[in-house]
Image (spheres, rainbow, N blue to C red):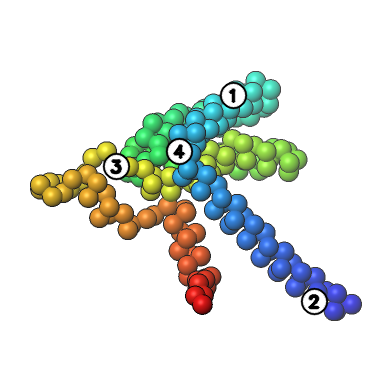
């Protein structure tokens, strides 16, 4: 009896590792797709925001949700539209980005307080959180690395000289990468051994 109990904990640890690796591989693949098809990703995010707005309207019409939660969700979608205007570039200090993050936190607070007062089946609670609260921010998170491979339009050099044009400045700063894909590549380089090509 104790052996099967021990075996169940070992199997659970293996399953957690497999699920974690599967999620990491899926995120890596999505980040690669977003970098390759940036314009299409922007259109998909726009359609997701529109669909989420329609879902909020249907919740208002057919469900007994607080009006503040629906209004806050619609305001969050409006902030997402303003963040999408500069896609694939994200200015973390812009009012649109800050207000979108603040409204997202406020939406979670309203959702948790509503679902703690009114009982819903777990599947319906998960559906609300997935479609209304997590879908668009997750897509923005995956597309953070999309601007690493886009060509620059202007240089950030305060006093440009004759030698510092846009392309030179871009390639001088190219070593800094902060996106999701660069995090995965750094983890891959750190954890996995490099293949050595044998020459005979």
- Marks counted in the figure total 4
C-alpha span from label 2 to label 1: 49 Å
Task: Check residue 62 in the rendering and tell me which mark sits there, or answer none.
Answer: none
The residue beneath circle 3 is: 152
Which residue matches tag 4? 38
Among numbered discs 3 and 1, the one appearing first in the sequence: 1
Query: Is residue 96 positioned above or below 92 on the image?
Result: above
The CA distance from mark 3 to mark 1 is 36 Å
Choose the circle earlier in sequence order: 2 or 1: 2
**Who comes first in sequence, dot 1 or dot 4?**
4
The residues tagged by marks 2 and 4 sit, at their Cα atoms, a distance apart of 48 Å
Where is 11 relative to 97, above or below?
A: below
Q: Nearer the viewer, residue 64 or 35?
A: 35
Farthest-out residue, front: 200
SS class, disc 3: loop
- Report which residue position mark 1 lands on: 54
The answer to whether residue 72 is above or below residue 141 is: above
Q: Nearer the viewer, residue 17 or 135?
A: 17
Q: Picture coordinates of residue 75 (x, y %)? A: 47, 29
* Visible residue check, residue 106: no
Q: Residues within 10 Å of mark 4 (few under 14, many from 20)?
A: some
In the rendered image, residue 33, in percent from the top left (x then y), is placed at 52, 44
């Amino acid at each position: 009896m104790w052996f099967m109990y021990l075996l169940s904990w070992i199997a659970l640890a293996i399953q957690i590792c497999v699920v974690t690796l599967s999620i990491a591989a899926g995120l890596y693949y999505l980040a690669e797709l977003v970098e390759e098809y940036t314009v299409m990703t922007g259109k998909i995010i726009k359609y997701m925001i529109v669909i989420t707005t329609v879902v909020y309207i249907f919740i208002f019409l057919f469900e007994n949700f607080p009006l503040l939660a629906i209004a806050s969700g619609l305001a969050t979608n409006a902030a997402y539209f303003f963040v999408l205007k500069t896609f694939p570039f994200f200015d973390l200090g812009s009012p649109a980005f800050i207000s979108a993050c603040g409204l997202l936190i406020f939406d979670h607070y309203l959702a948790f307080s509503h679902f703690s007062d009114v009982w819903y089946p777990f599947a319906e609670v998960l559906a609300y959180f997935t479609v209304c609260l997590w879908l668009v921010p997750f897509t923005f998170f995956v597309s953070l690395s999309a601007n690493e491979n886009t060509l620059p339009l202007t240089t950030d050099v305060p006093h440009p000289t004759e030698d510092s044009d846009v392309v030179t400045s871009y390639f001088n700063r190219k070593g800094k990468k902060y996106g999701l894909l660069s995090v995965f590549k750094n983890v891959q380089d750190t954890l996995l051994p490099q293949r050595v090509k044998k020459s005979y």
